Amino acid sequence: MQPDKEFSPQDSLALIQTMISKTKDSFADNTFYFLFWGWLVFGCSLVSYSLKVLLHYPNHYFIWWLIPVGGVITWVYGARQAKKERVKSFVDEALDHVWLGVGLAFFVLVLVNVLGSQTWQTAFTYYILLYGIGTFVTGNLIRFKPLVLGGLINFVLAVVSVRFGYDSQLLIGALAILISYIIPGHLLRARLQKNTSQHA
Amino acid sequence: MFKELDPILHSQLRLAVMSLLIGVKEADFTFIREKTNATAGNLSVQVQKLKDAGYIEVVKQFKDNYPLTTCKITPKGIEAFDAYVKALQQYLQVGKG
């Protein structure tokens, strides 16, 4: 851009529109989190189900120790990404807060389940509810329908899950995470990659 | 009677920077340079002018030994941008009639 003497109001308006369109609806690629947590929880649920129901292994819940490991990996990844971040949109900021809230709620729920009695019977109901809140809000903020739909289906699955025992809830939880994280995560990644290659 | 267009904003590159920053929480210097296609030297000068006017906040820091300059619009900047757009509208409406 050159310094200019004659810069008309029409030029100004056109420039403002062009620049605003460059940041409009922009958000950082957050598909890593959906795919990482999606596949991790999906895998843990199925392994836990297999160990408990099929193999009758008494310490079947050991597999869930991978979750705090996942937390550390996510934290390291997030810190590295923050360093690379060149622009932060309001949507990015809102998403940070939503997922921080959801993450804290997961942590609290784990404590409730560990400290309470009989709480494991409904543990997955609330986990599914939290997946749903996170993906429903994210999907609406970034205007990505598969995430919104995944969130809505999770709200239904949360209700359905109370009618089942813990073993079946493991499978319902796996289904919920498949619908709300894994499938929308892959679809979103494909869309973002397509957009990047178009703009390259 | 026309409102005078704010001379700080009525300049192509400074207006481009402000229009970018109005839509985001913050952006770094490289991002702004890429989006405006400006040279680093010219952009530095214009960013400094916007900073001096109190329209943007500039934070200089180091990340992994690389300098990183982050820019963010201030409430005063938002107000000035808003007033500038209103003044533009006035010009354009008169132009139509």
Image (cartoon, coloured by chain):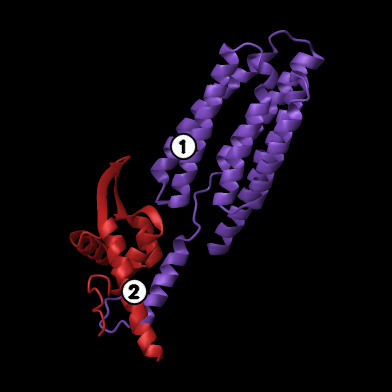
Which residue: 49% across, 56% down?
A26
Residue A78: x and y in percent read 46, 37
Q: Quadrant of the N terminus of chain B?
A: bottom left
Residue picked out by circle 2: B86
Image colour assigned to chain A:
purple
Q: Chain of mark 1?
A: A
Separation of marks 2 and 1 at Cα, in angstroms: 40 Å
Q: Residue furthest bottom?
A: B97
Q: Residue at x 74, y 28 (%)?
A: A161
- Name the foreground residue: A66 vs A139: A139
The chain carrying label 2 is B
Indicate the colour of chain B.
red
Q: Using residue B1 as the reference point, say whether residue A76 is left or right of it.
A: right
Residue at the extreme left: B52
Q: Residue at x 68, y 9 (%)?
A: A59
- Spot occupied by residue A174 in the image (x, y as percentages of width and height): 72, 30
Label 2 or label 1, whichever lies nearer to me, is 2
The residue drawn where x is 33% and y is 64% is B18
Nearer to us in this view, B26 or A128: A128
Amino acid residing under circle 2: Lys
The 10 Å Cα crowd at callout 2, few under 14, some 14 to 19, many 20 or more, is some
Residue A44's spot in the image, x, y percent?
Answer: 67, 24
The kind of residue on which mark 1 rests is Gly
Task: Evaluate whether residue A77 shows in this view.
Answer: yes
Residue A112 picture quarter = top right
Residue B34 vertical position relative to residue A63 in the rendered view, above or below: below
To which residue does mark 1 refer? A78
The image quarter containing residue A130 is top right
Q: Quadrant of the C terminus of chain B?
A: bottom left
